[in-house]
Amino acid sequence: MLWDEEFETLPREALEALQLKRLKNLVERVYTAVPHYRNKMDEAGVKPTDIKSLADTAKLPFTTKSDLRDNYPFGLFAVPFSRVVRIHASSGTTGKPTVVGYTKRDIDSWAELMARTMAGGGAHQGDVVHNAYGYGLFTGGLGAHYGAERIGAAVIPISGGNSKRQIMIMQDFGSTVLTCTPSYALNLADVMKEMGVDPASLKLRVGLFGAEPWSERMRTEIEKRLSIDAVDIYGLSEVMGPGVAAECIEQKHGLHVFEDHFLPEIIDPDTGKVLPLGEKGELVFTTLAKEAFPVIRYRTRDISRLITESCSCGRTFYRMERVTGRTDDMLIIRGVNVFPSQIEHLLMNIEGVEPHYQIIVDRKQSLDIVEVHVEVSERIFSDEVKVLENLGRKIEREMKDVLLTSCKVKLVGPKTIERSEGKAKRVIDKRKL
Ligand code: DLL
């Protein structure tokens, strides 16, 4: 369902005119208000008046996570601090978190964009939204919360954790929409099974899942095990939080980027050059309407491509292909580039394998060793040792074919890989480089 028909169906020409107007205004604003952006633009020899078309975006310098870190905590804010009404942060892999801020109007736009996300995924007034994204500095909990309220649904702000209680509440309160990470959705399905709760007896109808990469196979698994429609939603705190792009329930194929608020580009991660529409590369976003924490050409490190074909749902926004991996979680194993998503894809197509795995990388005598721990179904695990051995060898062979480097596979029993309440930890890199 469309939430904001006027903007969601703007003809491309009108949309691009709006983007350009907002882009010019943004560049002017940050040049005046944020010394970091002014310095970087001066270094690159570009002035706000040089932005005459959308293509001129390519003249602007990129922003990276380290720019955020260097200006920790509030150095990139573009409004006086007295206008900031909310602060969120995301934990980085190293040290300090990256900090973002919102004005009243930013919170209002965010709620609107999350309302679009909810409506696009098929949620509406009268729904009971079971919000199991974490509340706190993470943007998932409050982001989904405001969107659900904006469409007039009743929100249960349950946050992550205590899965048995979650299921009891789903039963008693009649939850119809589930919002959490896809890995936590599977975790909830496991616990339901343990408790002897039949998902079909619940009122759950749809799930809006995101905050981590997942595959088409995982979607099928979640849909089957929870008897719901599973929809992919995307965002990142530096750009706003959830509500940057979302699938429509009509197609469940590619996530509509809310282009009136975010200008997407796909670049070659090595050269920084903008790639032609449709090619795969690193996603870069410029925020077009944010006040407190605008970003110019933020390098997400997420890999995707833009889909320009029109969609049956009526939205004119381009779609981005589901994010399959990040440029920075690419593992280099004995010189070969390996993406965890390749391993996941391969595993998900093997009978008897559960969608829970962990990749452990270590270095012994200066040689990289990869061990992939893979959970197998109860049935396979209780089968003869030989069956298990054969399965392990089969996976090792397939991995070698796909990854062009060898990994050791260890099949582990059901529920032995630690479950997460938020983002799943798929890779443990023990190498000290
Ligand atoms: O994860 C915001 C969010 C919350 C999105 C709830 C969706 C739902 P961060 O913690 O800043 O923000 O992490 C952002 O998570 O750059 C991607 O690598 C990854 N990510 C987010 N959504 C998806 C998705 C939130 N649907 C980082 N598919 C992003 C794949 C995703 N990866």
Image (cartoon, rainbow, N blue to C red):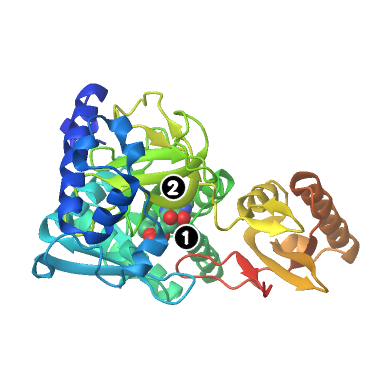
Nearest the camera: 143 or 285? 285
User: Which residue is at the front of the view, 190 or 359?
Assistant: 359
| Residue 58 found in image quarter | top left
**Percent from the top left, x then y, of residue 349?**
69, 46
Residue type at mark 2: give it: Ala
Instruction: Return the mark for residue 230.
Output: 2
Q: Residue at x 24, y 29 (%)?
A: 16
In the displayed structure image, the side of residue 420 where residue 369 appears, left or right? right
Mark 2 surroundings: few (<14), some (14-19) or many (≥20) residues within 10 A:
many
Residue at 23%, 22% in the rendered image: 13
The quarter of the picture where residue 134 lies is: bottom left
Helix, strand or loop for disc 2: strand
Image quarter where the N terminus lies is: top left
On the picture, is 82 further left or further right than 394? left
Residue at x-position 38% and y-position 72% = 97
N-terminal label among 2 and 1: 1
Q: Is residue 92 above or below residue 220?
A: below
Q: CA distance from mark 2 to mark 1?
A: 10 Å
For the image shown, how many numbered marks are present on the structure? 2
- Say what amino acid the circle numbered 1 marks: Ala
* Quarter of the render that holds ligand 1: bottom left
> Which residue is under mark 1?
185
Q: Is residue 147 above or below residue 195?
A: above
* SS for dot 1: helix
Of 204 and 63, which appears nearest the observer?
63
Q: Position of residue 259 (x, y in %)?
A: 28, 38
